[in-house]
Amino acid sequence: MTPVERIAELTKALAEARAAAVDGAEIDLTGLVSAVEETMEQSRVAPLADRAALVSGMLELLKELDALVASLTRRRHAGARQQAASAYGAASDDEIKS
């Protein structure tokens, strides 16, 4: 698999993880960092003809990673709000938003 194909595969995996996280599922990102590091290392020696596609793919990968982080942060904050509401006797998350 070429680095361009691997970056596309990683981007798709991040999108799937983000969708699962939005649905409330636990996600496993084990191996993500090493896969990205390995792919970046392979990208360094890629042919010049592939460089534009690599840069484009890397930008898409970063966008998807940012979106995943944002989704996980929102989920964590929503959980913390709900936990605080329960601790202080609020009836629901909707009341907290009011």
Image (tube, rainbow, N blue to C red):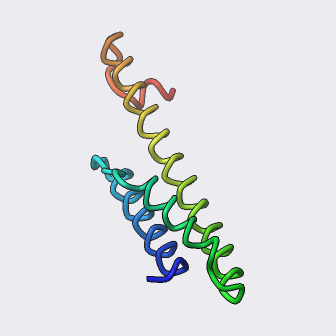
Answer with the quarter of the image where residue 61 lies: bottom right
Residue at image location 71% in from the left, 85% down from the top: 48
| Outermost residue to the front | 45
Residue at image location 34% in from the left, 51% down from the top: 30
Q: Is residue 50 above or below residue 60?
A: below
Residue at image location 60% in from the left, 73% down from the top: 43
Give the percent coordinates (x, y) of residue 47: 66, 85
Q: Is residue 51 above or below residue 41?
A: below
Give the percent coordinates (x, y) of residue 65: 53, 56
For the residue pair 54 and 96, the one nearer the viewer reads as 54
For the residue pair 27 and 38, the one nearer the viewer reads as 38
Quarter of the picture containing the N terminus is bottom left
Q: Is residue 70 above or below residue 94?
A: below
Answer with the quarter of the image where residue 45 lies: bottom right
Answer with the quarter of the image where residue 53 lies: bottom right
| Outermost residue to the top | 88
Give the percent coordinates (x, y) of residue 88: 35, 10
For the residue pair 29 and 42, the one nearer the viewer reads as 42
For the residue pair 8 and 79, the one nearer the viewer reads as 8
90 to the left or right of 54: left
Residue at image location 37% in from the left, 18% down from the top: 85
Give the percent coordinates (x, y) of residue 37: 51, 58
| Outermost residue to the left | 25
